[in-house]
């Protein structure tokens, strides 16, 4: 206990009676099923996108979407790590960084896909 009567959880690295799951950053252990599903989904999407990028030689667009999908896969791997140990700071950092920044890459790829045909469709 600290001076103010609250228990300090700074030294917690695994679930124990002294370090309950309720005191983790989320207050729960991320679910195995849904995170494994999304990890597999984005993993398959990454491989399919890699194949399509090579097949159609759409290097710039394909690379952006590939980076986004691979980042999402890494993020859900981090969530799976946190399912096993919600106190794991590496799992938390993996998922928080990649699940925040990966959609940016996907959005840039979508913007390129939308703006590319627009000059072809203009009425000029």
Image (tube, grey):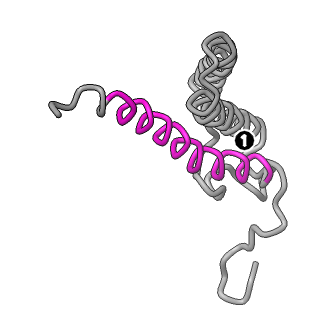
Residue sitting nearer the eye, 70 or 15 = 70
Residue at (42, 30) in percent of width and height: 113
User: Relative to residue 102, is residue 118 drawn left or right?
Assistant: left
As drawn, 26 above or below 52: below
As drawn, 71 above or below 25: above
Can residue 114 be found in the magenta stretch? yes
| Residue 52: x %, y % from top left | 62, 13
| Residue 1: x %, y % from top left | 76, 78
User: Relative to residue 19, is residue 71 drawn left or right?
Assistant: left
Residue at (70, 50) in percent of width and height: 92
| Residue 53: x %, y % from top left | 64, 19
The residue to which callout 1 is attached is 82
| Quadrant assignment, res 30 | top right
| Quadrant assignment, res 3 | bottom right
| Highlighted magenta segment, given as a residue range | 90-117
| Residue 78: x %, y % from top left | 72, 40
What secondary structure predominates along the stretch shown in magenta? Answer: helix
Residue sitting nearer the eye, 13 or 124 = 124
Residue lying furthest left:
123
Residue at (29, 32) in percent of width and height: 118
Residue sitting nearer the eye, 116 or 24 = 116
Task: Determine whether the residue tagged by mark 1 lies in a helix, strand or loop.
Answer: helix
Quadrant holding the C terminus: top left
As drawn, 38 above or below 102: above
Can residue 109 be found in the magenta stretch? yes
């Amino acid at each position: 206990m600290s001076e103010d009567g609250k228990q300090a959880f700074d030294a917690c690295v695994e679930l124990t009676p002294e370090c309950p799951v309720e005191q983790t950053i989320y207050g729960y252990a991320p679910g195995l099923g849904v995170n494994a599903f999304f990890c597999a989904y984005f993993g398959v999407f990454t491989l399919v996108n890699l194949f399509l990028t090579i097949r159609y030689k759409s290097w710039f667009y394909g690379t952006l979407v590939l980076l986004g999908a691979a980042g999402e896969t890494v993020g859900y791997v981090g969530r799976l790590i946190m399912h096993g140990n919600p106190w794991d700071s590496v799992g938390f950092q993996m998922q928080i960084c990649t699940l925040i920044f990966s959609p940016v890459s996907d959005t840039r790829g979508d913007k390129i896909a939308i703006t590319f045909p627009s000059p072809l469709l203009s009425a000029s």
